[in-house]
Image: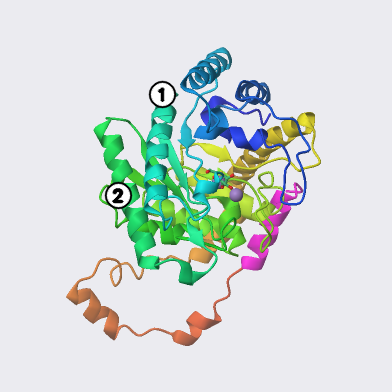
């Protein structure tokens, strides 16, 4: 039971299980694993796919010969294990050139270099099979608002997205973009900090149909927001192109903990939402093991993400099949159909009837909702006593 299967589309970035345990205060605690080793580790734990930044695979200073050797070794590891590459992305944040951002750097040479680096990274991702391309603008922001014209920054970011969409079309690549918001860290403030902000921005792009979002649990939680609500808005807009699963205590630094390790209830509501609507994209775990883990414990971390997802998926099915829960839900919705002819799509007749309808306002206010009972049943279901 709870065995990952290809149809679950569980993926990990090279940077996730490959994380070496460095933090701003301490040196690495784990050895570097090569991309080939990471692919074998992912196959061993039962993952379906691997994602990467250009420089997770090919170091930024590799020669063309080194690049070709690395890529061919990686392709062999993929062929040997059956691991696929559904998503790729660009590292536009580690190199000092990007210290003031990439597409929104004040320096036009940096902005042009970011476009060049991204086109090359798109070529690499597509060569390895990626159909989704993620943009996480970790350095696209400021520490001080007087340092940047905020309207210029929006314009530059828009121009970059339009340029890169046109490049993808020009190459006839089958690739869509997924923009990943984050409120802060590593910049003091990052532009377009939430899923809602990103969805608004996408509508201003030339080829908005090619561009969706890649929401990450931890990023909305850092901002103190309800992640599932943002995912629902993205889904409703037809823009949930990818998702980064992990966990995070509210109000803390960027923790990237194992999925479901902090807030089981919000993880449950998320999995239930994704499964109920039939999301069939990647379930990408953008998390890393605690700094105290050795490689064996990293494998336990990787398995734990997938196992928790599958347990919560089972809990969601149990919730949907629970007759007591379902009868409370129908009591809550209280739909006797009597309002159907007054609401829904507008007509002037409807509006006239609705304006003259006599509501019993006091009775409406007196009607209780059994949310305490419903929530306790949910908690008991999650705790395994139901
Ligand atoms: C980085 C970041 C993530 C992004 C990755 C893609 S890299 O680890 O914290 O949220 O998804 O660039
Ligand atoms: Mn992420
Ligand atoms: Mn993160």
Q: CA distance from mark 1 to mark 2?
A: 24 Å
Asked which secondary structure carries label 2, the reply is: helix
Percent x, y for residue 338?
Answer: 36, 69
Residue assigned mark 1:
127
Crowding around mark 2 (Cα neighbors within 10 Å: few <14, some 14 to 19, many 20+) is some
At 58% across and 52% down in the image, what residue appears?
217
Residue 10 vertical placement versus 161 (above, below): above
Q: In which quadrant of the rendered view does residue 293 lie?
A: top right
From the viewer's side, name the closer residue of 252 and 71.
71
Residue 240 visible at all? no
Residue 208 circle label: 2
Does the beta carbon at disc 1 come under 8 Å from ligand 1?
A: no
Location of residue 104 by image quarter: bottom left
Left or right, 208 with respect to 331, comes to left
Residue 105 percent across, percent down from the top left: 43, 55
What kind of secondary structure does the magenta stretch mostly adopt?
A: helix
Is 185 placed left or right of 166 in the picture? right
Give the camera-side residue of 98 and 219: 98
Residue at left offset 73%, top offset 41% = 21
Magenta residue check for 380: yes
Q: Residue at x 55, y 57 (%)?
A: 227
Q: Which mark is residue 324?
A: none
> x%, y% of residue 248?
67, 54
User: Percent x, y for residue 62?
Assistant: 53, 26
The answer to whether residue 339 of the structure is visible from this angle is: yes
Whether residue 16 is situated above or below residue 144 in the rendered picture: above
SS at badge 1 = helix
Q: Quadrant of the N terminus?
A: top right
Identify the magenta region.
Answer: 371-386
Q: Is residue 211 magenta?
A: no
Residue drawn 54% across the image and 60% down it: 183
Q: State which tag comes first along the sequence, 1 or 2.
A: 1
């Amino acid at each position: 039971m709870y065995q990952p299967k290809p149809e679950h589309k569980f993926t990990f970035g090279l940077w996730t299980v490959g994380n070496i345990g460095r933090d701003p205060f301490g040196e690495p605690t784990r050895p570097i694993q090569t991309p080939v080793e990471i692919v074998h580790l992912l196959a061993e734990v039962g993952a379906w796919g691997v994602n990467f930044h250009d420089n997770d695979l090919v170091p930024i200073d590799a020669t063309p010969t080194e690049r070709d050797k690395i890529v061919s070794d990686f392709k062999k590891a993929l062929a040997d294990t059956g691991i696929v590459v559904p998503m790729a992305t660009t590292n536009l944040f580690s190199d000092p050139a990007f210290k003031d951002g990439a597409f929104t750097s004040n320096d036009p040479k940096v902005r042009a270099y970011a476009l060049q680096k991204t086109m090359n990274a798109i070529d690499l991702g597509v060569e390895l099979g990626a159909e989704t391309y993620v943009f996480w603008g970790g350095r696209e922001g400021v520490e001080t608002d007087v340092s940047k014209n905020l309207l210029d920054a929006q314009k530059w970011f828009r121009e970059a997205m339009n340029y890169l969409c046109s490049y993808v079309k020009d190459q006839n690549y089958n690739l869509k973009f997924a923009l990943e918001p984050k409120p802060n860290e590593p910049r003091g403030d990052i532009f377009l900090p939430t899923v809602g902000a990103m969805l608004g921005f996408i509508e201003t792009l030339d080829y908005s149909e090619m561009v969706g979002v890649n929401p990450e649990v931890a990023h909305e939680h850092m901002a103190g927001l309800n992640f599932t609500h943002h995912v629902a808005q993205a889904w409703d807009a037809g823009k949930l192109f990818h998702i980064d699963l992990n966990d995070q205590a509210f109000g803390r630094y960027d923790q990237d903990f194992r999925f479901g390790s902090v807030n089981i209830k919000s993880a449950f509501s998320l999995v239930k939402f994704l499964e109920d609507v039939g999301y069939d994209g990647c379930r990408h775990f953008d998390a890393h093991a605690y700094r105290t883990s050795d490689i064996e414990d990293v494998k336990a971390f990787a398995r734990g993400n997938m196992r928790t997802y599958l347990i919560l998926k089972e809990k969601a099915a149990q919730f949907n099949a629970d007759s007591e829960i379902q009868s409370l839900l129908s009591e809550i919705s209280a739909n006797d159909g009597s309002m159907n002819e007054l609401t829904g799509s507008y007509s002037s007749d409807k509006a006239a009837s609705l304006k003259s309808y006599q509501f019993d306002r006091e009775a409406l206010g007196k009607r209780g909702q059994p949310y305490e009972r419903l929530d306790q049943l949910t908690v008991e279901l999650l705790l395994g006593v139901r």
